[in-house]
Amino acid sequence: MSQEQLSSADLFRWAQALRRENPQVSYKQIKERLVREFQGKPFPPLYNLTIPEQDARAPEEDWSAGLSLVRRGIQFQDWSDVADGIVLSLEQTENYESERGPEGTRDDWHDRSRGIAEAESKAVGKWMPEELMKLAERQTKK
């Protein structure tokens, strides 16, 4: 990896890629490799600790579980803490998916549109032109 400053999301994606390449690798091994790989490199910035694409995979309380550890690691310049946080977020996200199944197969309680679908359709109907509504409906049917 180059000397450019990576974000916490980049580190998370890196850990995810390791896990995808070898699903048998343990979280401890991922942590050790992350520390080894990034030791001496610039720490991620503190202003953006989020991992935005994870919101579609698991609730925020799962994927963000390790971000306080990442923050502490950055503040104290400790790659071990950063790695602990990244691995905790990865573990929580994977555990959630394995227990609940992929997005779209969950129960009503985890349905993010439950309780707002009617209000959303009313609001969209007020401002979205009819031809755009038809286009959107055709696209979702495909």
Image (spheres, rainbow, N blue to C red):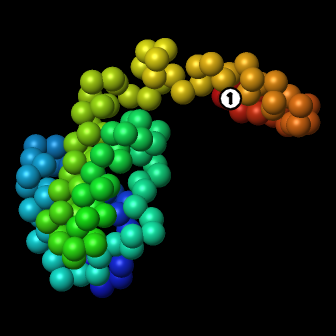
Q: Is residue 134 visible?
A: no
Indicate left or right for 18 with 29 as reference. Answer: right
Determine the residue positioned at 82% across, 24% down. Answer: 122
Indicate left or right for 34 with 58 as reference. Answer: left
Residue 58 placement: quadrant: top left
Determine the residue positioned at 68% across, 29% down. Answer: 140
Residue 128 placement: quadrant: top right
Give the labeled residue for mark 1. 140
Q: Residue 33, how many percent across, how many down? A: 12, 64
| Along the viewing direction, whichever of 131 and 8 lies nearer the viewer | 8
60 vs 82: above or below: above
Q: Residue 18, how many percent across, how many down? A: 21, 55
Q: Residue flagged by tag 1: what amino acid is it?
A: Thr
Indicate left or right for 110 with 34 as reference. Answer: right
Q: Residue 59, how many percent across, how many down? A: 41, 36
For label 1, the SS is helix
Indicate left or right for 58 with 11 as reference. Answer: right
124 vs 76: above or below: above
Q: Can residue 75 be seen in this view?
A: yes
Dot 1 surroundings within 10 Å: few (below 14), some, or many (20 or more)? few
Q: Which residue lies furthest to the top in this view?
A: 108
| Along the viewing direction, whichever of 109 and 94 lies nearer the viewer | 109
Q: Residue 86, how many percent across, how many down? A: 25, 56
Q: Quadrant of the C terminus?
A: top right
Q: In which quarter of the image is the N terminus?
A: bottom left
